Amino acid sequence: MPLSVRPKSVRPLSARPTAALTGAVGAGLAAVLVAGCSGSTGAESLAAAAADGSSKPRAAAAATATPTPTPTPVGPYVALGDSYTSGLRISPQQASEPKGCSRSAVNYPSLVAEALGLSGERFRDVSCSGARTVDLTGAQSTEGGSNPPQLDALSPATRLVTVGIGGNDAGFMDVVGQCAKENLVDAFKGLVGSDRAAAPCRDSYAAAGGGDQVQQKVDAAGERLGQQLKEIRRRAPQARVYVVGYPSLLPADPASCVPVLGSTVAGGDLGFLVEKEQQLNAMLKRRAEAAGAVFVDLAAPSAGHDMCAGEDARWVEPPFPAHGLAAIHPNAKGQQGAAEAVLRAVRG
């Protein structure tokens, strides 16, 4: 039966991680302070401390200091991003305009804001389905009207920013579609007597010449994202910025997808798609770190919840999704999983 996604099926977030994510959460960070001497003896250090009126060497005093934890941001919070952020077709939809952005009331920005107690003017979700990095500083045309430049929602008062974007720049959905097309053509060739390739989609991109075409798009997307992260910092200099990655679309062992995808994509091309998504997430991580932002990894917590998992387990819908949901996009469980990952990062 199709999976029915209703708002009441989404559990409210709490400070405790879900059982599915408990194993992925580390117990904490250990701080190790190492004191050393530069060409002076221990006696000399003690003598210098005594001369300074101190009863202990400074290194020993420093070792007793307790780091001050970074407080959780209290808003205003601005959410930027594409359809993986907005919650394409997930009910209930927000009443915000334009409708073409398809923002869900249970997308991860909404769940994060609720968990942090942010509402009204302290929370703005301006994410939009189909958004590219250029739409952060330029208006985006949708079927339901124009979405203003997303960065217009920022101000010097902004204290928390999440941004989930880059997949459309890299043409990742186009790559998935092209792989399905190449495999369909190759299957037809097999019917007429030609040998089927192990990875027709990978072969097609390699035959295009000029190296790895997908990687070139990912790199170009990274350049644009890097510039936009600088602009975010300029407009909201006091904000803590989190770059949110993409969840695992496919399992580490693509062979387990055969019962779900059938012959839609060859086994070799499933591995190709896994590789391309890893390249996309790696680029996002590099750009976040270079900009002084925090990268929120969704690939690890979503492992085992890919589109080839069962209906009760998956966070991402397969090419033939549950009724009313978007193919190869997160469902409500995926948005909740993303919210929990963001909250872990925000709360430190």
Image (cartoon, rainbow, N blue to C red):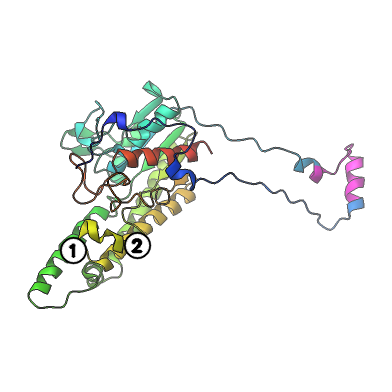
> How far across and down, in percent of the image, does residue 272 sit?
30, 64
- State yes or no: residue 178 in magenta: no
Whether residue 52 sits left or right of residue 143 in the image: it is right
> How far across and down, in percent of the image, does residue 44 sit?
91, 51
- Mark 2 residue type: Asp
> Which label was assigned to residue 253?
2
Assess disc 1: are there few (<14), some (14-19) or many (≥20) residues with their C-alpha within 10 Å of its C-alpha. Answer: some
Question: Quarter holding the N terminus?
Answer: top left
Label 1 SS? loop
> Which label was assigned to residue 327?
none
User: Which residue shows up at 84% across the image and 58% down it?
Assistant: 39
Decide: is 155 above or below 56.
Answer: above
Decide: is 210 above or below 64.
Answer: below
Q: Residue furthest front?
A: 1
Q: Earlier in the sequence, mark 1 or mark 2?
A: 2
The quarter holding residue 228 reads top left
The dominant secondary structure in magenta is: helix
Residue 154 seen in render: no
Give the magenta range.
44-60
Assess disc 2: are there few (<14), some (14-19) or many (≥20) residues with their C-alpha within 10 Å of its C-alpha. Answer: few
In space, the residues marked 1 and 2 are separated at their CA atoms by 16 Å
- Mark 1 residue type: Ser
Whether residue 247 sits left or right of residue 203 in the image: it is right
Question: Quarter holding the C terminus?
Answer: top right
The quarter holding residue 323 reads top left
User: Which residue shows up at 23% across the image and 50% down it?
Assistant: 318
Q: Which residue is mark 1?
A: 263
User: Which residue shows up at 44% across the image and 52% down it?
Assistant: 285
Label 2 SS? loop
- State yes or no: residue 55 in magenta: yes
